């Protein structure tokens, strides 16, 4: 609840402030999510974590659409022969994360 000091009006806070630990976790997610390294260059367990993060798929899709039309980043993640199939799977992962975050953010 936010109270306007000048008018005295009370308003509900629609977005909670983000804690410092979540900001640090988000920054680590970006660092792990193949922003610098390829997924294939990471150790097995860290590659699995990177493949689960939505940032990995977002960056790979952006690279595919803007820079690398061959889809090398998508092939590193999925390893399929078809760039279209790789991009589709990455889009499905992003849709799953969007649904998960939306469901978690809905207040009942």
Image (tube, grey):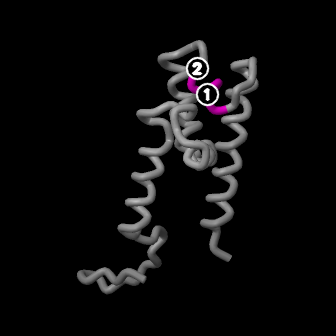
Give the side of residue 80 with respect to residue 11, left or right. Answer: right
In-front residue for pair 98/29: 29
Identify the residue position indicated by label 1 in the image. Answer: 76
Q: Identify whether 68 is placed above or below 3.
A: above
Task: Determine the secondary structure under disc 1.
Answer: helix
Q: How many labels does the image show?
A: 2
Extreme-top residue of the structure = 70
Within the image, what quadrant is residue 100 found in?
bottom right
Task: Determine the secondary structure under disc 2.
Answer: helix
In the rendered image, residue 21, in percent from the top left (x then y), is placed at 40, 67
In the rendered image, residue 61, in percent from the top left (x then y), is placed at 57, 29
In-front residue for pair 5/62: 62
Q: Are marks 1 and 2 in contact (CB under 8 Å)?
A: yes
The boundaries of the magenta stretch are 72-77
Is residue 7 shown in magenta?
A: no
Residue drawn at the location 51% of the way across and 31% of the way down: 38
- What is the distance, in whole Å, between disc 1 and disc 2 at their CAs? 6 Å
Q: Identify whether 107 is placed above or below 25.
A: below
Is residue 73 shown in magenta?
A: yes
Within the image, what quadrant is residue 2 found in?
bottom left
Residue drawn at the location 55% of the way across and 47% of the way down: 46
Extreme-bottom residue of the structure = 8
Extreme-left residue of the structure = 6
Secondary structure that dominates the magenta span = helix
Identify the residue position indicated by label 2 in the image. Answer: 72
Residue drawn at the location 64% of the way across and 51% of the way down: 98
* Quadrant where the C terminus is found in the figure: bottom right
Q: Identify whether 28 is placed above or below 94.
A: below
In-front residue for pair 101/72: 72
* Quadrant where the N terminus is found in the figure: bottom left
Residue drawn at the location 55% of the way across and 42% of the way down: 43
In the rendered image, residue 71, in percent from the top left (x then y), is placed at 60, 19
């Amino acid at each position: 609840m936010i109270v306007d000091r000048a008018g005295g009006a009370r308003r509900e806070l629609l977005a909670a402030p983000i804690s410092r630990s979540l900001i640090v976790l988000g920054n680590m997610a970006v660092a792990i999510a193949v922003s610098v390294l390829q997924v294939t260059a990471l150790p097995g367990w860290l590659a699995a974590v990177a493949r689960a993060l939505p940032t990995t798929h977002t960056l790979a899709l952006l690279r595919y659409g803007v820079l690398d039309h061959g889809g090398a980043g998508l092939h590193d993640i999925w390893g399929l022969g078809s760039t279209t199939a790789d991009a589709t799977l990455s889009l499905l992962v992003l849709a799953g994360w969007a649904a998960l975050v939306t469901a978690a953010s809905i207040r009942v």
